[in-house]
């Protein structure tokens, strides 16, 4: 079976050909979703030119092993805990992050942009 979108992104950003669920990787990031408990580092992320999408309350919504559905709407983004219920909503994700998700990952977005230039 092929890799999921998340595995493809992690493989690409860690310099590996393939990663699998449960594997630890060291990856270079350019965007991050920070739980509210880590919001203190947000200024450092901005200073490092990393796009931050902070979601207040996300750490209370989801716990390890639970299934999370993310719904990207034009006017908001919603997070639903499918395991035990609960939902959070916020403003839409940053445009750059939305483009990466719509393309199916950074690699696909880069391929699309290169194709447009040729």
Image (spheres, rainbow, N blue to C red):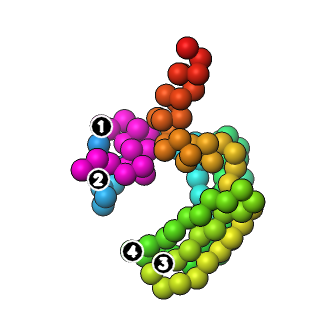
Relative to 4, say whether 88 is above or below: below
The reply to whether callout 3 and callout 1 are in contact (CB within 8 Å) is no
For mark 2, what is the residue? Answer: 20
Number of numbered labels in the structure image? 4
Sequence-wise first label, 3 or 1: 1
Residue 93 in view in this figure: yes
Sequence-wise first label, 1 or 4: 1
Q: Position of residue 6 (x, y in %)?
A: 42, 51
For mark 4, what is the residue? Answer: 65
Sequence-wise first label, 3 or 2: 2
Name the residue located 59 percent from the left edge and 58 percent from the top edge: 33
Sequence-wise first label, 4 or 3: 4
On the rendered structure, is 32 left or right of 1?
Answer: right
The quarter of the rendered structure image containing the C terminus is top right
Name the residue located 30 percent from the left edge and 37 percent from the top edge: 17
On the rendered structure, is 90 left or right of 14?
Answer: right
Q: Secondary structure at mark 4?
A: loop
Distance, label 3 to label 2, CA atoms, is: 23 Å
For mark 1, what is the residue? Answer: 17
The span shown in magenta is 1-17
Q: Secondary structure at mark 2?
A: loop
Marks 3, 1: nearer the viewer: 3
Relative to 67, say whether 95 is above or below: above
Q: Position of residue 67 (x, y in %)?
A: 44, 73
Q: Is residue 95 magenta?
A: no
Q: Secondary structure at mark 3?
A: loop
On the rendered structure, is 41 left or right of 15?
Answer: right
Q: Position of residue 113 (x, y in %)?
A: 57, 26
């Amino acid at each position: 079976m092929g890799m999921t979108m998340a595995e493809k992104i992690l493989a690409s950003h860690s310099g590996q050909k393939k990663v699998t669920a449960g594997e630890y990787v060291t990856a270079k990031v350019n965007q991050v979703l920070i739980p509210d408990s880590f919001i203190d580092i947000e200024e450092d992320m901005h200073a490092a030119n990393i796009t931050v999408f902070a979601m207040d309350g996300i750490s209370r919504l989801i716990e390890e092993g639970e299934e999370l559905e993310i719904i990207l709407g034009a006017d908001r983004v919603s997070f639903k805990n499918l395991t035990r219920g609960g939902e959070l909503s916020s403003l839409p994700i940053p445009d750059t992050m939305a483009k990466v998700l719509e393309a199916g990952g950074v690699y696909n977005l880069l391929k699309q942009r290169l194709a447009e230039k040729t």
